[in-house]
Image: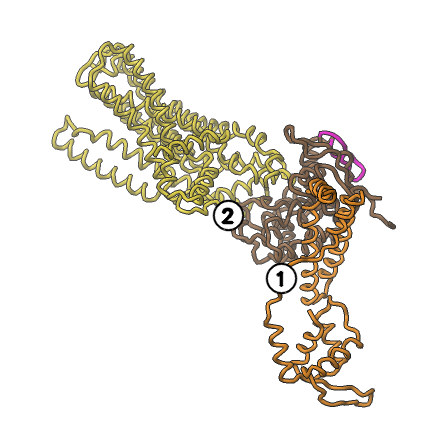
Amino acid sequence: MRTDLRLAWLLVRGSDRWEWWRIALTVAGAMCATGLGLAAAVLASVHGQYRFSFGNGLLDHPGERSGVIVTLLLLLVPVLGLLGQCARIGAVHRDRRMAVLRLAGAEPGRVRRIAALETGLACLLGSALATAGAAAVLTAVWEQPTAAAWAGIALVAVCVPVLGTAAVVLALRRVVASPLGWVRRSHPRSGRGPGLLFVGGLLVVGVAALGAVAGTSVDSNYAGPGTGPLIVCAVVLAVGAGAVWLTGALSRLTGRLLAARTGSPAVLIAAERLRDDPWAAARTHAAVLLVTVVGTGFVGVRQALLAHLETMDGSYGFAQDAAFYTTGLNLTAAAIALALAIILTALAVGTAESVATRRRGLAAQVAAGVPRRVLARALLLETALPLAPAVLVAGTGGLAIGIWYGHLAGDGGWPMPYTALPVPAGVYATCLLTAAASLPLLRRSVRPAELRYV
Amino acid sequence: MSNRPVPLLVARDLVKSHDRTPALRGAALELGEGEIVAVTGTSGSGKSTLLHCLAGIVRPDGGSVTYAGKRVDTLPEHRLSELRRTDFGVVFQFGQLIPELTAVDNVALPLMLAGTARGAAQEQAGAWLERFGVRKQEAARPGELSGGQAQRVALARALVTGPRVVFADEPTGALDSLASEQVMTALVGAAREAGAAVLLITHDAQVAAYADREVRLQDGVTVGSGVLA
Amino acid sequence: MSTRHILLGLLAGGPSHGYDLKRRHDEHFPQARPLAYGQVYTTLQRLVRDSLAEVEGTDSDGGPERTLYRLTEEGSREVATWAGQVTPPAPFVTNEIFAKVVVAILTDGDPAAHLLAQRAAHMERMRELTALKTAPGSGLATVLSADYALNHLDADLRWMTTTQARLTTLTAQTVEVDRS
């Protein structure tokens, strides 16, 4: 184990800029994950009615508190996506290095252990930093944290690095099989369509919904412990998997249709890349779609709820303070914005990685006289083409949620949530901007110097 | 000697360093119209850098490159890019084919960049693939081709636009001697037929023997008949 | 390689006369030096003397009289043994280029310039051979013979390249050995 640790350290120390980027992003991702987990754990450790000095009373009642906890846990999904994306940085380089280790006589288990140690150490660092920060904040805002709160913190701090390491071992189970991995000529496809995951998610939704219906019929006030969050999780899972499937299928379809017909070199290159590996970007794009649905739906719900609050002001015994609701809405908005930011980071990382991995080939294209702007346009189209129809569908879904909620909350009409309309367009535009942000990298990394080793 | 070809590409006193490592230290070379010249030398003698300077892929730190009577090394990047697209063709050891495109689309790409319609470009590309004996593989992607087939597709891509100069950097470096013989025969035959000049970088004397003459590079300087008499 | 054994091999296909043997030899080995008639006849006479071949008869359909030769039993055995034997890898190759380099060092000449000139000569010959083998209509026998020669010249060239890179050390050692 000590030699493994030393080897892992030597490999990290001798690695290039890309590897350092991966490590830094992994640390940041682990920090995010730990932070969210810690907040959820501390809130969960509080039982019953409790008076918090902040949050406008939103955290005081157990019901709303569990809602906040679920939101925090849901935010873990995009963070995990980001971590997954980070693992892809330098994947080709890493595969090669591991294959060389295997050739030198290391057993598969050992190679896997070395790779897991590299990521595990990064996760441990991120987790330690986040825990230290959280502990400082906690002692500042809460005079006497309970033992349960500390126990939760310790649990999360340990779990994040362990889970991160486990995820790497899982992700690398196929990579280290062959000592000759590095001679592989055709590049590996990134997995098959997530059909199984989609069906599984739907099944969970169905079972949970049935359980919820059964629960409410027995006792109309209490729908059984944990059924609500379970349904939400399952719906998110199903929508997410469906979104991956949709983007993947759309990518492949767009690619195939365009590749056969287009006369433009940039479109041809982008379309053939999509057709060749439609699932590569689908995972990040799926997260974009998820946030589009949730974001559009939320803005619609928000418009309806605010209108409702204005008309109902003081006449019902909802809450003494409208700030209770607005704080809740603002917190949710912040959570969605955070999710979007994380997803955009993942998107940027993905695009940058795609350029970095292909930089030799791209340099050869430029040397052969393919103008940089054709390559840049192809890179943008790779994001823009499949995302346009997918965002349209997701936006429509989100609008439907908004209209439906407005119908329920209002007086039976079908109000149009106009404020939600710019959301899908905004998400699409930010995604394009993010992809465009990686273009300077194309200019920088596609240099003739790359040709020296061709 | 009598009827020397007119110099088409002339390099004088080329100096180029990578970071602080000198690669070229006053190399000179002339390439006549339709002439096939092999540049040989040990690894690290500056062969590839010389090709990059001549093809306008990198700018030399000193000296001049003249193509058809005009300075090339001072042209702006977009003009260089255009020159490489229209007048030059390049073949590397590997990597010049886009892995996601089929063989025929890879060859049609330079034509499409020049504004030819897809169908017409594919037709011309198909004819070149036929000429190099890889027509059957036109729907295959580079990963599915053997090394020799991939290089013949690369040759087709370099020659499809009718370039006046073909730059070949170790085009047979990854091939066995039989595949290498096929690629060289195809390259030299097609270039002679089209009247294109070839600048061939190689460390293999048997490959260099396909050329009309040899220019030898030693420590970044050309020795022997770099410049026409 | 001996003309003797090649002629025996050609005779193995059936009785033949001298002119035919020469013609077949030159066709099978296009890159070898063409055989002279005189050499064919003296070799055949020696084969008869050693009882590896014998005279089958003479025919003269109108032209000059020609002697037909055929293989004896002993001759077939001899040719089979020869063809089956592994050719001994040459233990030492007489290397004129190396000798000239050493002499150039000893006589204060310019061995580097000599190697460069030799390289040019080798390359010139390799270009001729490559042109020969890629010329349209050249048969496989020509291609293979040219390849054989090309590979040997290439080996010489590689040896010259490494020697060139070690000339300084070689000069020092040669001078030292000469002095002691």
Say if mark 2 contacts mark 1, CB within 8 Å.
no
Q: Chain of mark 2?
A: A
Which chain is orange in the picture? C
Number of residues whose C-alpha sits closer than 10 Å to that of mark 2, classed few (under 14), some (14–19) or many (20 or more): few
Which chain is yellow in the picture? A
Left or right of A243? Residue C170 is: right
Q: Nearer the viewer, residue A286 or C56?
A: C56
- Tag on residue C115? none
Left or right of A217? Residue A367 is: right
Q: Residue at x 52, y 44 (%)?
A: A272
Quadrant location, the N terminus of chain A: top left
Instruction: Tell me if residue A318 is in the magenta stretch.
Output: no
Majority secondary structure in the magenta region: strand
Per the rendered image, the range of residues in magenta is B61-73
Q: Residue at x 78, y 75 (%)?
A: C39
Do the residues indicated by labels 2 and 1 lie within the same chain of the protein?
A: no
Looking at the picture, which amino acid does disc 1 mark? Answer: Pro
Spatial distance from mark 2 to mark 1, Cα to Cα? Answer: 39 Å
Q: Nearer the viewer, residue C60 or A272?
A: C60
Q: Is residue B31 visible?
A: no
Toward the front, the furthest residue is C180
Which chain is brown in the picture? B
Residue A331 is drawn in which quadrant? top left
Q: Specify the color scheme.
A: by chain
Looking at the picture, which amino acid does disc 2 mark? Answer: Arg
* Residue labelled with disc 1: C89
